Image (cartoon, coloured by chain):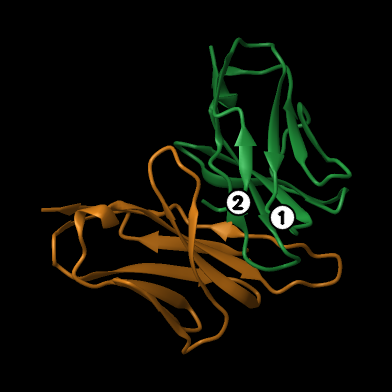
Chain colours: A orange, B green
Amino acid sequence: EDQVTQSPEALRLQEGESSSLNCSYTVSGLRGLFWYRQDPGKGPEFLFTLYSAGEEKEKERLKATLTKKESFLHITAPKPEDSATYLCAVQPVLFSGGYNKLIFGAGTRLAVHP
Amino acid sequence: DSGVTQTPKHLITATGQRVTLRCSPRSGDLSVYWYQQSLDQGLQFLIHYYNGEERAKGNILERFSAQQFPDLHSELNLSSLELGDSALYFCASSVGWDTQYFGPGTRLTVL
């Protein structure tokens, strides 16, 4: 069964203290892995798409990496405004009759304190 | 701003009632998806429409239904509402099989 597990569930950092969030996945075949940021009561905001092992993408203080079994979201020198829930989602390879299915993890709640 | 719009932002209603949530996708996107997010369930896929046709159903209750209109906007209808239906409902849109962009959501409270 396709599954996504994110860890830790919650993370508290001091401003400037770098860290990484983990997304482990089990799918029959991976078409893409997506990272989203979600603020309380708001819709998920797209951050990155990764398609193949070894791929890396960066945006400001965030860098996402992908291996065959997991993805990491590295946060360098975080600021309080980076506080949010970070969601990982995997898109399995489409077989005949398939659809654009996203399987979401439960998310990591990040709190960055001044 | 993702370009996906949803109305209303908030909805408060009573058990047994019926409500309609509306979504307008990003310009050019033919696919619309509906998701439910509750505190204990995370983001759960409900249903996918592509260019007016239903493509897939996820964990959608029989009391819930959706449709996508010729102008590509979509509506999610929730009927015989129960307390447990209280949640955030999100719409997302995409071009084909690519990245899904989410709207701001509708917060439904059933009293």
Residue placed under numbered mark 1 in the picture: B27
Residue at 46% x, 89% y: name it. A54
Label 2 is placed on what type of residue? Gly
Q: Are marks 1 and 2 on the same chain?
A: yes
User: Disc 1 is attached to a residue of which chain?
Assistant: B
Q: Secondary structure at mark 1?
A: loop
CA separation in Å, label 1 and label 2 = 8 Å
Q: Residues within 10 Å of mark 1 (few under 14, many from 20)?
A: few
Q: Quadrant of residue A28?
A: bottom right
Q: Secondary structure at mark 2?
A: loop
Q: Position of residue A63 (x, y in %)?
A: 36, 76
Residue placed under numbered mark 2 in the picture: B3
Along the line of sight, which residue is nearer the eye, A109 or A28? Answer: A109
Identify the mark at residue B86; answer none if there is no mark.
Answer: none
Q: Earlier in the sequence, mark 1 or mark 2?
A: 2
Mark 1 and mark 2 in contact? Answer it, CB < 8 Å: yes
Q: Position of residue A104 (x, y in %)?
A: 53, 56
In screen coordinates, is B36 left or right of B59?
A: left
Q: Position of residue A38 (x, y in %)?
A: 42, 50
Residue at 72% x, 17% y: name it. B18
Is residue B39 positioned above or below A100 on the image?
Answer: above
Q: Position of residue B40 (x, y in %)?
A: 46, 38
Label 1 is placed on what type of residue? Ser
